[in-house]
Image (cartoon, rainbow, N blue to C red):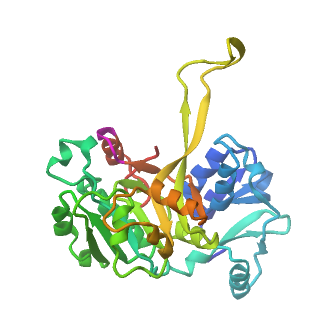
Amino acid sequence: MTADKSEHSWRKTLLPSTSTLQQAIRNLDESALQIVLIVAEHDVLLGTLTDGDIRRGLLRGCDMNCAVDTLMTRNPLVVPEVLPRTTVRQLMQTNKIHQLPVVDQIHRVVGLHLWDELHSPGQRANLMVIMAGGLGTRLRPRTEDCPKPLLPVGGKPMLEHIIERAKAEGFGTFVLAINYLGHMIEDYFGDGGRWQVKIEYLREESPLGTAGAIALLEPRPSLPVLVSNGDVLTDIRYSELLDFHCRHDAAATMAVRLHEWQHPFGVVRTNGVDIVGFDEKPVTRAHINAGIYVLEPASIDVLNLGEPCDMPALFTRLNDRNARTIVYPMHEPWLDVGREADLAQADSVRLRGHETTKK
């Protein structure tokens, strides 16, 4: 946590008020400081923008061209340069914030206090289950003698990228659900000692879908469980997803991505045989399942042992029981490696933490 962090670092968070949401997301990715400082001329602070602000904007229907000044937090908490660090630390702890702008007498940004400068990622006792039992049929012939999660991306299996990223955020206990060529995954990862983590296995006798294998967990976990498909590469912060889930007191949380698709033709709107309007190559926007979840232990009870079940069906069962299910809108780079083109794309682009790309 520091106010005198080099210009090369904290100044990257500064963004003009005329910027768009897309530019703000790029700023967050490039600075890696989890906050954007929206400024006027001479770096006078107008407001702040965080992941939470962006996710709320996406849920309201904002697109990538939304102006940041419609999403930012105005009049954020700030501190002067002369404030003692012990006082700054108390302020941040009391207000539960991880970044605190430093301003001068004319409200010009001169620094940024960062909680993470003093606190390394805490250890997470939560279990992470990774679904690694798929057949990978769309990637044949590559997967005829290699399970899809072991296919290399940037010189190492994509499953290894997932484990290493989660480990860097404090997760140390993993369970891999395996079926097709599962012995190869066990041979490669073993008990996890090579990565200084603990790895166990759920061995599916037959494919159980993207959720069914979770019913095999013994003993049942006592804490929320993080779940990821074994072919999803992303820069999502697993710990922030888990915290989001806990803050909202949900039974299950699904990470979602905003997907935009432009119709290749002009669309004619009709009422019967009458033309009522035209839309020239309209853009359709929808939230899609990103293949990453958090489940409360009680949510596992809706699964039947040995019965195939996919995650959407699990969420539907929870909804039918009036359990709260929520979405975590993510903007981070994400790629579901399901086809040959996806694998080539993932292998060619390097991002923070591992190789992947936006989809």
Magenta highlight: main SS: loop
Q: Is residue 233 above or below residue 193?
A: above
- Residue 8 visible in rendering: no
For image coordinates 16% across by 64% down, the residue present is 183
Quarter containing the N terminus: bottom right
Q: Is residue 63 toward the left or the right of residue 45 in the image?
A: left
Q: Nearer the viewer, residue 52 or 273?
A: 273
**Image location of residue 16, percent across then percent down:** 72, 49
**Which of the 4 image quadrants contains residue 265?**
top right
Q: Nearer the viewer, residue 124 or 178?
A: 178
Q: Is residue 106 toward the left or the right of residue 121 in the image?
A: right
Q: Is residue 8 above or below residue 127?
A: above
Question: Which residue sits furthest bottom?
Answer: 86
- Residue 2 visible in rendering: yes
For image coordinates 63% across by 76% down, the residue present is 2
Question: Which residue sits furthest right?
Answer: 106
**Which of the 4 image quadrants contains residue 13?**
bottom right
Q: Find the magenta span and give its range.
A: 337-341
